[in-house]
Amino acid sequence: MLLQAIAIDDEPAALKVIESHASKIPFLNLKETFLHPTDGLAYLQKNQVDLVFLDVQMPDLMGTELAELLRSLDIQLVFITAYADYAVKGFQLQALDYLLKPVPLTRFLEACNRALQGRQKRLKQSPSLFIKDGYDWVRIELEKVLYIRSDTNLLFFHQEGKTVSTRMTISKALELLPQGAFVRVHKSYIVAISAIKKIERHQLTVGNEQIPMASSYKEHLQRLLLP
């Protein structure tokens, strides 16, 4: 799936950063960029896109005001701004994410992965993530993931007969994974709920592997799985 996107920001330098980041993400097609919010609005009234990167403070029309006008459209919004003060308003407008300038590529990618999952959910497709493994971009089909192991800032996604690693914290992975499909059972492990075969006192059987279970996570897991 390719996400179709546009960006609206009155700062040319900010649009250049978005263009640069977008060019590095294989599932994102940045179709157009606009310096004037009214031009972006006119484009959206005639063209369908999946995602809009939107500055907040702009002349003539604030990004939050433009977001209000777009509520009736099936568009996901990501605010990109230098001002943290508008974060609450942004989420009240059901923005997918709120990125502060200067935006690192990793945060930009997280927002795009959220948009990808949102689009997949709307189309009832299997959820997936794109991660960077060395120099390669790899699609992880989340339904095939048995468990995720953390080792410092590296995450290892374990599937049947296959493991893919990427630089990411376990807390960030939890933010990106679909709710209700995965659960944390240890400071270093997340498991797919559907892959749990057996719960013992201090470990789980997931697929053919034994995964340690910390007592601090055991009660939450039991509430999820046991009658």
Image (cartoon, rainbow, N blue to C red):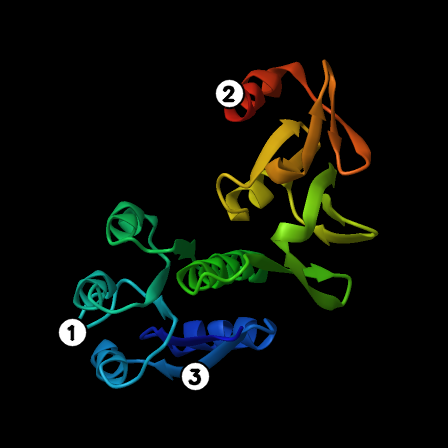
The mark nearer the N terminus, 1 or 2, is 1
User: Which residue sits at x=36%, y=70%?
Assistant: 52
Q: Which type of secondary structure does the marked residue at label 3 adopt?
A: strand
Q: Nearer the observer, disc 3 or disc 1?
A: 3
Locate residue 184: give its quadrant: top right
Q: Which residue is mark 1?
A: 60
Left or right of residue 79, residue 27 in this image: right
Q: Which residue is mark 3?
A: 31
Place of residue 141 in the rendered image (x, y in percent of width and height, measured from the top left): 64, 57
Label 3 packing within 10 angstroms: few (<14), some (14-19), many (20+) = few
Location of residue 207 with respect to 70 vertically, above or below: above
Q: Name the residue type under label 3.
A: Lys
Q: Position of residue 203 (x, y in %)?
A: 74, 21
Q: Residues within 10 Å of mark 1 (few under 14, many from 20)?
A: few
Q: Which mark is residue 223?
A: 2
Residue at 60% in and 21% down:
217
Residue 72 image offset from top left, x and y in percent? 20, 66
Neighbour class for label 2 at 10 Å: few (<14), some, many (≥20)?
few
Q: Horizontal and vertical percent for residue 178?
A: 51, 46
First of labels 2, 3 by sequence position: 3
189 lies above or below 213? below
| Residue in view at x 66 percent, y 48 percent | 168
Amino acid type at mark 1: Asp
Nearer to us in this view, 43 or 227 = 227
As helix, strand or loop, the secondary structure at mark 1 comes to loop
Q: Residue at x 49, y 63 (%)?
A: 116
In front: label 2 or label 3: 2
Q: In the displayed structure, would residue 127 be above or below residue 177?
A: below
Kind of residue at disc 2: Arg
What's the distance in space between the residues labelled 1 and 2, CA to CA?
A: 52 Å
* Mark before the other along the chain sequence, 3 or 1: 3
